[in-house]
Amino acid sequence: MKFRAVRPSQVGAVDAVIVPLFQDAPPPKWLPRATRSTIERIAKTERGTGRLFGVNTHHAEPRLVLVGAGKSADFDMERARRVASAGIRALWRANVRSVAIAVASARVGEERGAQAAVEGAIYAMWRPEVHRTNGDERRLPEIDRVALVTEEAVGGAIERGTAIGDAVNVARRLANEPANKMTPTLVAEAARALAKEAGVKVEILDERRCRALGMNSYLSVAQGSHEPPRLIVMRHNGRGRSGYDLALVGKGITFDSGGISIKPAENMHHMKADMTGAASVIAALSAIGKLKLKVNVIAVAPCTENLPGGGATKPGDVFTAMSGKTVEVINTDAEGRLVLVDGITYAQREGAKRVVDVATLTGAIAVALGHHFTGLFGKPDSFVDLVRAVGNDAGDRMWPMPLTDEYRDEIKGEVADIRNSAGREGGAIKAAAFLDSAVEDGTEWAHLDIAGTDWFDRDRAFAPKGPQGPAVRTLIALAERLASVRDD
């Protein structure tokens, strides 16, 4: 899909035009008078035209796709993305190759509006039915040219929107693959290919090297699987000095059966997406590389399966994490935190000043926040506030959660320093407290629990059901923010 920014007089011949339809604003003035009249007539006579993200199509030459955009005062980057995505999705089965999108600038400006339109169009080109044999059920639309109609120049909006949109779809693709087609080794191969494309460094650590580093908490999760674990490390050195301004650590459980503490059978197949955190940091680092941001970023993705077996970790087993703390495994289904603590320690040993980890960590966060907000934990408050502000602006809604010494006390082990499970009450907070045990003094840290936002179980106008690619935009935006205020 190729994008170009054009002025209204340069649109030329296209097969379809996507127009945001606001409840309190007229259609764009650059549209032909007849088209504006058609839009006004549809808005008055067709029921539901003002419904947010609702789509009305007028079959003419060119085809006119109207997408409900709500009130102008409520319009933001995320709404702009969703409007563009809903418009493109409405053309999935249409015989359309070239599309014009009327870029809405209400509250966001034309450059950011254009970037959001690019992202939304790219998101709409992803489908989850990749392994169906019926071509019609998995065929993507034939759209290959998109004109962004703006009144002003939009700078690097297309480049940035393309890099971010592609990264989100990469994360969705990796998370969508079944576990037999996305093993730890195959995730590592995907990371190698993405690193080569983005011009960033990649290193894959096998079990022997991880053992030599003392990553016994991570490796304890891998003991029941025949698939070898792989620790993926990607590096972008954009400012040319040693150390890292930011570390991204992602949970990479490519299938989670729960281990000996086995999960119920219902919906266990969705546990193929328990590596969404790893997919997110891999995809984000690749976009950071493509954008050539002047900041040093390291991504760490400890990948493994969590299965029962003769060698699997047993409840009550004790291991020594890379940090030197001893860990008592109470519940083998609380495995994500076991791999993350070693990933966090590794990132700090590599010189990271700030660490953000991303994980489908607890069902408890979905109980607390549902499927529309990511749980946000961390320290100090100033860094948590920064991550929240950047994330919300990027389109990943987050809600800060408490993390105090009372919760840290609850994860103290009976026979070891810490235990990986301490009851259901406040489960998401206790999991964060476990991760906090690996965060060293002076490190700024944020934990994103995406277990409620990584997957949606029904189609929406702007996105098909399945993996949603959460946190990717936040991680890229945070790297951009740090690049703009680099430490001396």
Image (tube, rainbow, N blue to C red):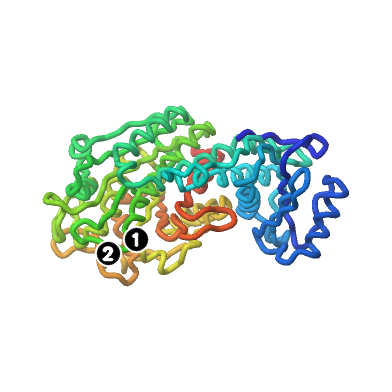
Q: Nearer the viewer, residue 54 or 325?
A: 54
Neighbourhood count class around disc 1 (C-alpha, 10 Å): few under 14, some 14–19, many 20 upward: few
Label number found at residue 131: none
Q: For the point 46% across and 60% down, which residue is it?
A: 457
Q: What residue sits right under mark 2 in the picture?
A: 264
| Residue 98, horizontal then vertical, whole percent | 68, 37
Q: What kind of element bears circle 1? A: loop
Q: What kind of element bears circle 2? A: loop
Q: Amino acid at mark 1?
A: Asn
| Count of numbered tags | 2
Q: Amino acid at mark 2?
A: Pro
Q: CA distance from mark 2 to mark 1?
A: 8 Å
| Residue 193, horizontal then vertical, whole percent | 40, 30
Please identify the quarter of the rendering in which residue 209 is found: top left
| Residue 109, horizontal then vertical, whole percent | 71, 47
Can residue 348 be seen at all in this image of the molecule?
Answer: no
Label number found at residue 267: 1
Q: Nearer the viewer, residue 320 or 271?
A: 271
Q: Are marks 2 and 1 in contact (CB under 8 Å)?
A: yes
